[in-house]
Image: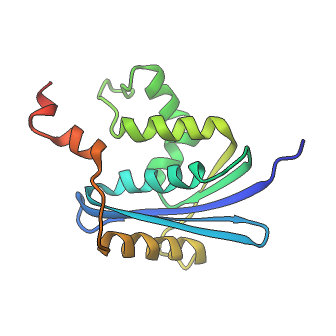
Amino acid sequence: MTLKHVEIFTDGGCLGNPGPGGYGAILACGEHRRELSGGYKHTTNNRMELMACIIALEALKFRCAVTVYSDSKYMVDSVSKGWAVKWKRNYWKRSGGDKAENIDLWERLLSEIEKHQVKFQWVKGHDGHEENERCDQLATEAANGSGLLEDAGYIARHSPVLSMM
C-alpha cells in the first residue's frame, strides 16, 4: 500500500527566551493545505519548535509518508542523528550525562514519529523560504495573540517547588 505523502513546514519562536511563545505549521498534500498555530504564556523557543512539529503530526488522521521541513537544527539533528532516541534509551540522559531538556515534548514527538514514515529536512530560517516565512508569521502572531495557554511542561521543569523534588 502506497502512503500519501505530506509535507509539513514548521516554525516556533518566543518573544524573549523564555517568554511568550508561539508555533506555526503548514501541512500540504497535493492541492490541500492546512495551517495550524497556537501560543503559550511562558515557554522557550526550542519548546515551540518541537510543539509545531508535534501538533502537525498529531493532526494527521492516518499513516503517511511525511517530510518535515524546519529551521530548527536542535529538532532536525536530534531526530535525524538519532540523539533523541538515545536520550530516551538512556533514561533521558545526554551523552555527557546531563539530563535532556523538554522530555515531555520529546516523548510526544517520538511517539508521533513512530506512527508515520517521517524524514526531517533542515531549511535555513529567514532566508526567503515561502513556507518557513509563513510559519514564522503564524508563530509570531500566536505569541502576540490573546488567550495564550500555559505550557505545563515548562512550568513543571522551572517551578522552584517542583524542581526541588
Q: Quadrant of residue 132?
A: bottom right
Placement of 64 over or under 132, stated as above or below:
above
Residue 152, x across and y down, in percent: 28, 45
Q: In the rendering, at what x and y percent does residue 131 appear?
A: 59, 73
Inspect this view and state whether residue 81 appears: no
The answer to whether residue 46 is above or below residue 22 is above
Quarter-of-image position of residue 164: top left
Residue at the limit of the structure toward the right, as seen here: 1
Front-lying residue, 159 or 133: 159
Q: Which residue is situated farthest in the front direction here? A: 147
Outermost residue, top direction?
90
> Which residue is at 82% across, 47% downward?
3
- Tell whether 69 sits left or right of 30: left
Can residue 72 be seen from the camera position used here? yes
Q: Residue at x 58, y 40 (%)?
A: 112
| Quadrant of the frame with the C terminus | top left
Q: Nearer the viewer, residue 70 or 163?
A: 163
Query: Residue drawn 37% across and 64% down?
Result: 22
Rendering coords of residue 101 (x, y %): 33, 38
Where residue 122 appears, as percent x and y from the top left, is 57, 57
33 to 59, vertically: above or below: below
Q: Residue at x 77, y 55 (%)?
A: 5
Tag count = 0
In the picture, measured across the screen, residue 124 lies left or right of residue 103, that is right
Q: How is the image coloured?
A: rainbow
Quadrant assignment for the N terminus: top right
